[in-house]
Image (tube, rainbow, N blue to C red):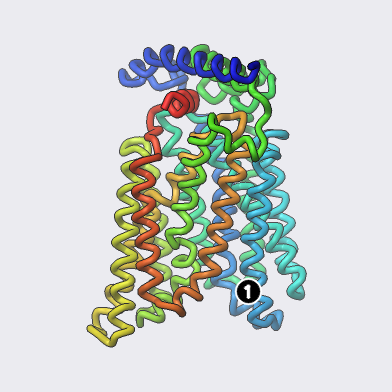
Amino acid sequence: MAINEDIENRETRERGVREQLLVPQEKDQAGQDEGTDKGHPWMVYFSTFVAVCGSYEFGTCAGYSSPTQDAIVEELSLSTAEYSVFGSILTFGAMIGAITGGPIADFVGRKWTMRMASAFCVAGWLAIYFAEGALALDIGRLATGYGMGVFSYVVPIFIAEITPKNLRGALTAVNQLMICAGVSVSFIIGIILSWRVLALIGLIPCAVLLFGLFFIPESPRWLAKRGRQKEFEAALQKLRGKDADISEEAAEIQEYIETLQRLPKASVLDLFQRRYLSSVIIGVGLMVVQQFGGINGVCFYTSNIFEEAGFSSSVGTITYAILQVIVTAIGAALVDRAGRKPLLLISGTGLVLGCIVTALSFFLKVHDLAADAVPILAVTGILLYIAAFSAGMGAVPWVVMSEIFPINIKGVAGGFATLVNWFGAWAVSYTFNYLMSWSSYGTFLLYAVINAAGMVFVITVVPETKGRSLEQIQAAINRE
């Protein structure tokens, strides 16, 4: 009975919060954005810059192995199997980071969690730099993978919790942009630098992040959840500007936090309770769609795909690296204007078309038809696929994940969704070569079907979160 009363009370409060926010929404339309009256959120931009250094570090970790493979194998006399372990163990470290990152972020705060992730990455890079054999390489790679997994959760969550709703989508999408930048830069400079020097380069974003964390506030929503009222108000004021009126936003956050704290503390099993199930289906479902549509298979083996199609692998891969950064930047700029769902649907359409065009190129090659068209179709299909993924499916699921979970389950649910994401990354990258051996064009047709199913999921299940506060999003989901 007590739990039912809590749930009813929560729903009543959420309806009240939603009704109270109708007036602020009208203010937003008049050009006075949430929490920024008479203030300027420069601290939001600076805090986001500091946080996305973790995203860039994520990218340097992911992009390290591709340009360094031949040099590491030659210098340390590694077998193919030993280097395969070195490459793949990153994903296992990231899975562990995904499992533990959420609860740690809820316990010690978002800033200390980013410090911890940076420490693991620093230790990992140093282990790789000083490595004289496979064991040190693997330990270093596992450590950087763990830090990368934690960053993949805590950075978008932190950004979503500090930004006003009119900026949240674009600034959260910068997370994916910086990941792409880290991967692309590592690939390009890795062609020039030695693998040990490239490992030292990986320390730079960690150093910037650790230094910057001294100057930015903790997440106000996390402080409110921990009952640190004065620090909560001070952090929110610092983020919104010293002359900004934060009373309305602070009251909204505080009321919602108090309502959620009346409910029992969430565990993994609680995620499947009715009141959380919609959020979990949306957040986890988008991660499934993102990964099982084939992105890691395509990205990890881009060079091989171009070679098999008879196109220059170096030209194709560098073009891919530049293209994904440009398109991701465009997507980040549009996510708060176009909305989350339109970008996901445009992205999904491009992914399906890219897979079909690539499948057609391999079908023609297998059946010795139109040989001159095979490289052109392969390049067109892969670049269309990468551009489409970068436009929406790469960044938007992380944006929505950071928005969709109630704060009392955000650690557990975010960790679970990130774990699913990394499991999907491993599964797709592991099975890609087997699928290509089975049928090269069949592989891309399979990915086309999965991406088409993902579009159906977005249309029928995923809500539009553009222009809503985190509290409004929860009220809408629970009402629905």
Instruction: From the top left corner, tell me how far across and down residue 383 is, in percent.
Output: 34, 65
Is residue 233 in sight in this rendering? no
Secondary structure beneath label 1: helix
Residue lying at 46% horizontally and 12% vertically, measured from the top left: 16
Seen in the image, is 300 located left or right of residue 220? left
Q: Quadrant of the N terminus?
A: top right
Q: Which residue is mark 1?
A: 84
The amino acid sitting under disc 1 is Ser
Q: Quadrant of the C terminus?
A: top left
The relative height of residue 112 versus residue 208 in the rendered view (above or below) is: above
Instruction: From the top left corner, tell me how far across and down residue 165 is, in percent.
Output: 44, 28
Rendering quarter of residue 92: bottom right
Seen in the image, is 303 located left or right of residue 53? left
The relative height of residue 163 versus residue 89 in the rendered view (above or below) is: above
- Residue lying at the far bottom in this picture: please name it: 368
Seen in the image, is 110 located left or right of residue 446? right
Residue lying at 46% horizontally and 73% vertically, measured from the top left: 435
Q: Using the image as rendered, state which of residue 284 and residue 398 is in the foreground.
A: 284
